[in-house]
Image (cartoon, helix red, strand yellow):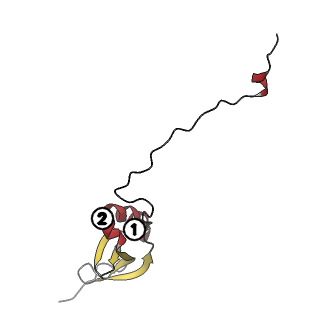
Amino acid sequence: MPVYRTEAKLQSWRALAVFEDGSECLIFLGRSTTQVRAGYGAAFAEILEPDERARVQNIVLQCWDGAPDEGRWVTKNNLNIPLRATGAKEDEEAPKPRILAFRARTTETDKTAVAT
């Protein structure tokens, strides 16, 4: 029986988080590198818990190579790990906004009376 490959070029891309222990977690799946690069940062924050984000060693950009039923994921590049919160802890309150004092400006015309 002949085998027909229906896809000649790479069609799917993904961002995959690699943890310290070697386990992996799919973060984002897209049709182009541009789409994956644009969306993986938000997905990283949304999908992973804070303790999981702290254990991420690397994020790899991979593409699907081959036919849908006979391919494999190929690592193409490493992506930057989105910034982690460093200052505040979870149990601490966020700083509250404060009202700054307002003083009206005085100009030279305000200081002198205008005679008519």
Front label number (1 vs 2): 2
Compared to 23, does 39 lie above or below? above
**Is residue 36 left or right of 110 when viewed as pictured?**
left
Q: Position of residue 75 (x, y in %)?
A: 38, 82
- For this orientation, the residue located farthest to the bottom is 1
* Residue visible at 33% across and 65% down in the picture: 50
Q: Mark 2 points at which residue?
A: 49
Sequence-first disc among 1 and 2: 1
* Amino acid of disc 1: Val
Q: Which of 37 and 110 is in front in this view?
A: 110
Q: Which quadrant would the C terminus be assigned to in this image?
A: top right
Q: Where is residue 27 in the image (x, y as percent from the top left)?
A: 32, 69
Q: Is residue 56 visible?
A: yes
Spot the residue most to the left: 1
Kindly identify which numbered label has been placed on residue 36. Answer: 1
- Quadrant of residue 19 within the rendered picture: bottom left
Residue shown at 47%/43% (left/top)? 97
